[in-house]
Amino acid sequence: MLLLPAILALIPFVAASAVPSELSELLSDDWPLNGKGPTDKQIVQQTMNTLESLYKKNNTVIDACTKCKSTLEIGKAISLTKPELIPEIFIKWCTDNKIATAANCKTIYSRNTITASRTGTDFTNMLQQIDPWSVDGDYLCYYKMSQCPLPEMPKVDLSSWWPPKNESNATLEYGTETFNVLHISDFHVELDYLPGSESNCTNNGMCCTGHSYNKNAKPASLNTSSYEFFESYYNEDGEFVKGHDITNENYNESVWLPATEFGSYTCDPPELLVNSSLKSIAEFQKKNNMTFDFAIFTGDMVDHDELEWTNYDMTIKSQETVMRDLKKYLPDIPVFSVLGNHDTFPYGQIASHASGHENLYTWNDELFADLWVGYDWLPFDHYEQIKKHYTGYSVVTKSGVKVIAVNSNTYYQKNYYSYNNMTDNIDPFGTLKFIVDELVESEAKNEKVWIIAHIPFVDYDTLPMQAEAYKQIVTRFSPTTITGLFFGHTHQDQFNVLYAHDNKTIDDAIMNTWIDLTVTPLSHYNPGWRYYEVDTKSKNVMNSYNYYMKLNETFTNHDEPEWLFEYSAREAYDVNGTWPKTSPLNGTFWAHAAENIKEEMSAAQTYSDFLYRKSPYVPDCSKGKCSTFYCYVSSFNINEYNKCIANKENIINYESK
């Protein structure tokens, strides 16, 4: 059994005076056997004494990063002997040292329950398995505790996972016809959305609910007495019904900015807005006498409310509500979905088979296997595959596209189970191997693949080693096998380009991503959705079309809102019409767009307009609000992005252009 005295001996940087002898005495080698071991209260107190000594102000011998990893080492020792004490110890440690707010310390380190999304049980499970002095501790102390710098990334090399590339195995042939695919993302339905409640809140959670408030006194100059609120809804036939006036029921004069029934820019959407978006899609198909061969939904069904208000039942209800509404409005369209970081409970967590704690999360795999197979979106024989791969799967559509769906929580930096033994096992969930095996098989058959996931590899939320692994995979199998990469998560309408070399020339462009606009208006976006025209043979996207709703026009107009055409990518990013009409919107097309954003403020402003779907909050590039746009669109993963912004030459000052 690994005991604390042995652990403390492994911390050479901790000054002897920083480790009280009492703790070693309490956890002496024979105390579990002598029948007179220390009480839990004694263990907690002496552990806190040790941590207090470690973090005392005059302890300048040890830097913050070493303190953090020492804390993890001490925590690991306790977790292996008395795991039930970890929550109490780390809540107090977090609070005393102001690692986070007292409320957040409680949320992070309290034991998991079904009534509130807390992750202390997962943290304890993780402590038992990590090596605090390896890259495990480096990344944990950077991402989760903000006490270490981002470490230099260990070497990642997946080249032995696949055969040498044979160009004759996979080719790109273009057809003369197209089919259509719908892309929707990030609904974040706010089930407790309350019209008339505070949308300009100061509480720690979501605005527009019965528990949202502004702690400050409302200025006398703010007059909101003219606001009205109606309990509108869509009936069983999908028809909009303007409900009865609920102004006097929900609103009070203390509210700074009342939430209106279709949504607010500071909140996730009510189901009314979700249904409006889906109805607009159904009506678009009918009006244009067209249909979508399939749809992709790139995750996030649960809202962003404070985790204290996020419980197990609400998580399931949100997930079932979104899937049900998709089936209701798109009854004949297969919807291929992935889970987002909010689509589990507790928030962001998923345990691998190898961790020994998989049983904590199999309920989610089973739920979505039931839903996706039950709605006839996936064949019955995929049921076990969905469960095996943490809701990941591969399916060949009627259009001949193989869709590989990935649960991005397997590379999410907030998932504690992503940190276990990172140096020796870059693929603890087996997801990378699953993808590579599918791609090798598809390449041999000249089958075209789309990969869908929630979190894009360029996002801060992607762990660096996994980000590099995905870059190597996509580089190896693009552009002839992988012909599409689709994400959500950022709430912005974005793209990234993968280049063969660091100098990022247009000729070196290999692949691009599509990061979808979202239905949720949080934070300050107009809601929207997109569809693609796809070449029948190459499965490349030939064009994309975005539609959106002006949310601010619903604040005083309580009728059903109108959804408008926003732009087509071909026309918006190739204003001079130089791109051949028969060529897809591939990596080279988007590399041209990236260069234009780098060189021209007008192109950057167009991109900025699209990020926010022309909401009142669009960043103004002439006022220095767009300086990192080029780094984002020209970086495929977070490692490239960090490298890009570190070079001041890549930070664009459009005012001087």
Image (spheres, rainbow, N blue to C red):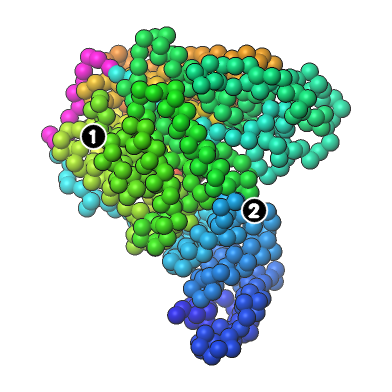
* Disc assigned to residue 574: none
Secondary structure found at label 1: loop
Residue that sits furthest to the right in the current view: 220
Secondary structure found at label 2: helix
Q: Quadrant of the N terminus?
A: bottom left
Residue that sits furthest to the front in the current view: 236
Extent of the magenta region: 168-178
Classify 47 as above or below 228. Answer: below
Name the magenta segment's main secondary structure. loop
Q: Hey, which quadrant is residue 480 in on the image?
A: top left
Q: Hey, which quadrant is residue 577 in on the image?
A: top left
Classify 89 as above or below 570. Answer: below
What residue is pinned by disc 1?
A: 481
Image location (x, y in percent) of residue 183 = 41, 26
Would you say residue 418 is visible in this rendering?
Answer: no
Eye-nearest disc, 2 or 1: 2
The one of 68 and 605 positioned closer to us in this rendering: 68
Image location (x, y in percent) of residue 653 = 56, 30
What residue is pinned by disc 2?
A: 104
Q: Hey, which quadrant is residue 383 in on the image?
A: top left
Is tag 2's residue or tag 1's residue first in the polypeptide sequence?
2
- Let me know if residue 174 is in the magenta part: yes
The residue located at (46%, 31%) in the rendering is: 324
The one of 337 and 472 positioned closer to us in this rendering: 337
The residue located at (64%, 53%) in the rendering is: 104
At label 2, which amino acid type do we have?
Asn
- Let me know if residue 528 is in the magenta part: no
Image location (x, y in percent) of residue 152 = 43, 56
